[in-house]
Image: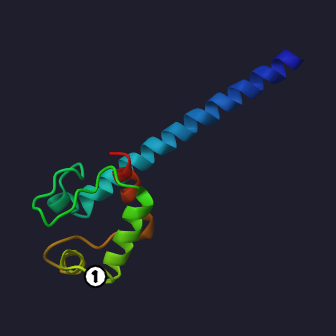
Amino acid sequence: MKHTALTASLLTLLLSAHAVVQAEDANEDAGAELFKFHGCVNCHGADGKSPVSKMVPELAGKPADELYSKATKILAGEGSNDEAKLMHAAFYSPSSCDAPPNDEQVKSITEWLSMQ
C-alpha cells in the first residue's frame, strides 16, 4: 500500500512539473508572438537585440520588472525623453502600430524579453 501511494505521489509530482514547464513555454511563445504582433520588432529587432537606430534601446536580457515599468509609463504617456514620447505617439497613431498591448500582454512581452 505504501509503495502504491509513493508511486502515485511521484507520478503526480512529475506530471505537475511537466505542466509547469509547458505553461512556461506557452508564456514564452506568447511573449514572442505579442512582441511581433504589436510591431515592437519594427524598431527593436526580432529578438529585442537588434534596434534599428541608436535612439532605440536594446531590450533583450534586461530585468522584466524594469522593462514592465518603463513600458507601462510609455504607454500611459508618462515617458520623459523624446524617444519615449515618439514610442507613445507611434502606439496611438492609426498608421504605425496595432492597438497597444494591454497589461497582461505587456507582462508577457517583458518576461519574454528578459529571457533573451
Residue drawn at x 34%, y 70% as measured from the top left:
71
Residue 106 point in image, percent of width and height: 39, 64
Query: Which residue is tagged 1?
Result: 80
Residue drawn at x 43%, y 45% as measured from the top left:
26
Question: Does residue 105 appear anywhere in the picture?
Answer: no
Q: Nearer the viewer, residue 12 or 62?
A: 62
On the rendered image, what quadrant is the N terminus found in? Answer: top right
Q: On the picture, is 15 further left or further right than 32?
A: right
Q: On the picture, is 98 further left or further right than 5?
A: left
On the rendered image, what quadrant is the C terminus found in? Answer: top left
| Secondary structure type for disc 1 | loop
Residue 9 point in image, percent of width and height: 76, 28
Give the tally of numbered discs.
1
Residue 95 point in image, percent of width and height: 13, 76
Residue 12 point in image, percent of width and height: 70, 31
Identify the image quadrant of residue 79: bottom left
Identify the image quadrant of residue 56: bottom left
Identify the image quadrant of residue 90: bottom left
Question: Does residue 19 appear anywhere in the picture?
Answer: yes
Would you call the spot at circle 1 few (<14 residues within 10 Å), some (14-19), or many (20 or more)? few
Q: Vertically, is 107 above or below 27?
A: below
Q: Vertically, is 34 above or below 74?
A: above
Say how the picture is coloured.
Answer: rainbow
Q: Nearer the viewer, residue 9 or 49?
A: 49
Residue drawn at x 45%, y 65% as measured from the top left:
104
Identify residue type, mark 1: Ser
Q: On the picture, is 51 further left or further right than 107?
A: left
Residue drawn at x 50%, y 44% as measured from the top left:
23
**Residue sitting at the far left:** 53
Q: Nearer the viewer, residue 34 or 69?
A: 69
Q: Vertically, is 78 above or below 33?
A: below
Q: On the picture, is 114 further left or further right than 53?
A: right
